[in-house]
Image: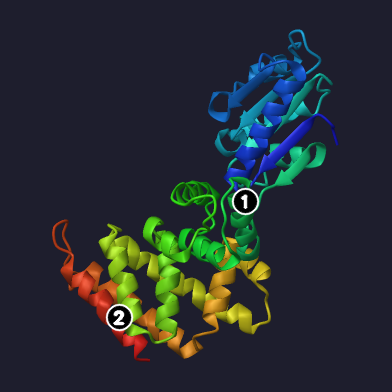
């Protein structure tokens, strides 16, 4: 392992961004400004010049910081091999090299395997529900706001695991309160628009409890918010497909972490789906999925007609699906 090479990657792009910001701020303070900090976007990196770049001496300082963003996600295999060969040689001690990936790169490539071997690696995984609630509470406190655990949970469910959006919503909510007043559930309902995925979770919850009125209301709110009706439908299909798989895996004794790995889903999605799947029987899930496939078939064969100006037939079919499912 080389002490001056670092590799950050993962789904939690917010935390990666904060980590890089912290590093650059600390480097500027220690080495007198940003003169010796270079950021290279992966699409612009020239593998043939990269080795020379790393050998460039720092200007009036002891170190240089070179940050390479999203190279593994964008570079061709041959270019990655060239960079891997360069890194496999001696990197000057004065050069601190950071590879940053805002997604999970292909772990089969030669460069990934080499970085995993020689670099200090940190994978930033998305936060599961309990940690997400703690994150909301901690961030709110750092920004001199107040929020209780129940309200933090409600906000996390309403927005989902996107820390960028959660951060923005926290700022918005704090700006709408005084220093002595906490963020309330009512305030969150008034100011925070639910994400499509979180609304689908809420809709599924209502269906599971046979709450026909509540289910139709969640669906109406989704439609009124301007979400594309076809996107709502296909997200519903996707969610019930995940529920079927989660139901099977839960009955096999798998925990949410294992389910997330096997289904290749976000831990938040896997945990929520695991909990929701317990509210349905296998037969119920089978019937629900058959109904959704029938709607999909009817749309594709023209029995359900939809145009840019008129989606009433699909709207009625989804409402009918919700009513029928609540009557199981």
Residue 126 showing in the rendered view: no
* Residue indicated by mark 2: 321
Q: Which element is circle 1 on?
A: helix
The residue that appears at 72% across and 15% down in the rendered structure is 32
Quarter holding the N terminus is top right
Residue most extreme to the front: 180
Count of numbered badges drawn on the protein: 2
Q: Give the side of residue 227 with respect to residue 91, left or right.
A: left
Place residue 316 in its image quadrant.
bottom left
| Residue 303: percent from left, percent from top | 17, 73
Give whichever of 34, 290 is nearer the camera: 34
| Residue 175: percent from left, percent from top | 46, 46
| Residue 25: percent from left, percent from top | 68, 27
Q: Is residue 297 above or below residue 129?
A: below
Q: Nearer the viewer, mark 2 or mark 1?
A: 1
- Cα distance in 3D space between marks 2 and 1: 43 Å
Q: Residues within 10 Å of mark 2 (few under 14, many from 20)?
A: some
* Residue indicated by mark 1: 141
Quarter holding the C terminus is bottom left
The residue that appears at 30% across and 66% down in the rendered structure is 221
Q: Earlier in the sequence, mark 2 or mark 1?
A: 1
Q: Is residue 93 above or below residue 148?
A: above
The residue that appears at 81% across and 15% down in the rendered structure is 62
Q: Which element is circle 2 on?
A: helix
Residue most extreme to the left: 309
């Amino acid at each position: 392992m080389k002490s001056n090479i670092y590799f950050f990657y993962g789904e939690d792009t917010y935390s990666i961004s904060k980590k890089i910001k912290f590093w650059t701020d600390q480097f500027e303070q220690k080495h007198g400004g940003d003169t010796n900090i270079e950021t290279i976007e992966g699409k612009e990196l020239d593998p043939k010049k990269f080795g020379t770049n790393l050998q460039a001496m720092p200007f009036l300082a002891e170190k240089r910081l070179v940050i390479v963003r999203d190279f593994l996600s964008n570079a061709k295999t041959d270019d990655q091999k060239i960079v891997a060969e360069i890194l496999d040689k001696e990197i000057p001690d004065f050069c601190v090299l950071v590879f940053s990936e805002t997604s999970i790169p292909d772990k089969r490539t030669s460069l990934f395997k080499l970085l995993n071997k020689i670099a200090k690696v940190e994978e930033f995984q998305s936060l599961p529900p309990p940690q997400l609630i703690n994150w909301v509470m901690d961030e709110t406190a750092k920004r001199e706001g107040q929020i209780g655990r129940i309200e933090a949970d409600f906000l996390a469910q309403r927005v989902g695991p996107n820390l960028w959006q959660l951060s923005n919503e926290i700022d918005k909510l704090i700006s709408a309160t005084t220093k002595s007043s906490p963020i309330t559930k009512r305030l969150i309902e008034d100011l925070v628009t639910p994400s499509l995925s979180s609304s689908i979770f809420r809709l599924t919850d209502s269906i599971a409890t046979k709450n026909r009125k509540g289910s139709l209301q969640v669906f109406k709110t989704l439609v009124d918010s301007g979400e594309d009706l076809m996107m709502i439908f296909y997200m519903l299909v996707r969610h019930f497909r995940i529920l079927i798989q989660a139901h099977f895996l839960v009955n096999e004794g798998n925990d949410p972490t294992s389910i997330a790995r096997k289904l290749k889903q976000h831990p938040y999605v896997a945990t929520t789906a695991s909990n929701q799947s317990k509210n349905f029987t296998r037969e119920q899930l089978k019937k629900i999925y058959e109904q959704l496939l029938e709607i999909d078939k009817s749309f594709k064969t023209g029995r359900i007609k939809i145009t840019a100006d008129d989606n009433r037939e699909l709207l009625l079919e989804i409402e009918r699906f919700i009513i029928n499912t609540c009557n199981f």
